[in-house]
Amino acid sequence: MEKQLFALIFVCLGLYQTRAQEVQIQYMANQGVWIKSQDKQILIDAVFDKEFEFLDVLPKTELELLDDAKPNYNEIDLILATHLHGDHFHPILTGNHLRANPKTEFFGPLETFSVFQQKFEGFQEISNRVHTDSLQLHQTSAYSLNEIKVEAFRLAHFGTHPWNKAENYAYLIHLNGKKILHVGDSNLNIENISKLNLAERKIDVAILPYWQIGSSERMDLIETYIGAKLLLIAHIPLENFADAQQDITQLGYQNAKALTQQFEIIILD
């Protein structure tokens, strides 16, 4: 009987440890994700309102909950914005959330910080929890934000002028032994990503924009210079939702999943 009881306790402890170490990535909208562990929650590029008709956005009911930091958005530890464009960041929504939730911190590039400061009237109330850095192109730096380790990489934004002039940061999140990379709207060309030695970091998941994966040459670059175990493809135009997964598979990606279903959860364990 004692042996059976001990075995049961051991199994229960094992299940608890598994759940404690589990990391979830929940798709929100466009390129926004919600990363969760047992005790930490991070939103990346998820706090924004409608900017472009051809991209998805959270329903108004969810935006209101997020704005007011009401359940299930009342335990967010960190909000990250990769850059200032309105399909990734909204200063008033973000500011309202920080004001409603005194534990939440924010980090973004310097020009994103400046827009936040200019457009959110209550900025002084939350300024001690709003953080930034001025990284030069291809420069990296590491931070501890609300006890979460984050590495930021300055990478060129894809596209032509003026889009490519945006200060765009990629983030590498370290959480429960997992490494999750979110590249924002980075141009995934060899000049941009070959300088960072990302493949050496043994990344578990990379969240990449749909716009930047569409050729066998680009696939080779991603596999060589990022080398993540799983690719989550986001920033997909609404008109491409239905065929996105098939298109990605036909390109030859073996480890890539299209993010098109709002609130879908991917479990990393």
Image (tube, rainbow, N blue to C red):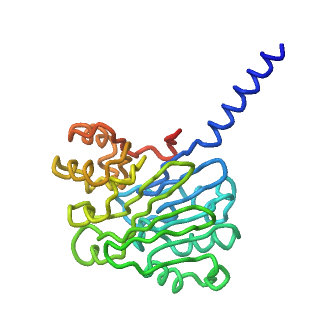
Q: In front: 215, or 119? A: 215
The residue lying at 65 percent from left, 47 percent from top is 38
Q: What percent of the width, then of the height, locates residue 46? A: 50, 60
Name which residue lies at 56% across and 71% down: 106
Residue 195 percent across, percent down from the top left: 27, 65
Q: How many marks?
A: 0
| Residue occupying image coordinates x 20% and y 52% | 218
The answer to whether residue 130 is above or below residue 43 is: below
Instruction: Residue at 27%, 56% (x, y): give it.
Output: 211
Image quarter (top left, top right, bottom left or bottom right) of the N terminus:
top right
Q: Residue furthest right?
A: 1
**For the view shown, which residue lies furthest in the top direction?**
1
Report which quarter residue 172 is drawn in. Answer: bottom left
Give the left or right position of residue 222, taking residue 172 as reference: left
Residue 199 versus residue 221: which sits nearer the camera?
199
Left/right placement of residue 235 relative to residue 90 reads: left
Give the percent coordinates (x, y) of residue 229.
37, 43
Which picture quadrant has residue 96? Answer: bottom right
Residue 3 position within the rendered picture, expressed as x and y whole percent measured from the top left: 78, 16
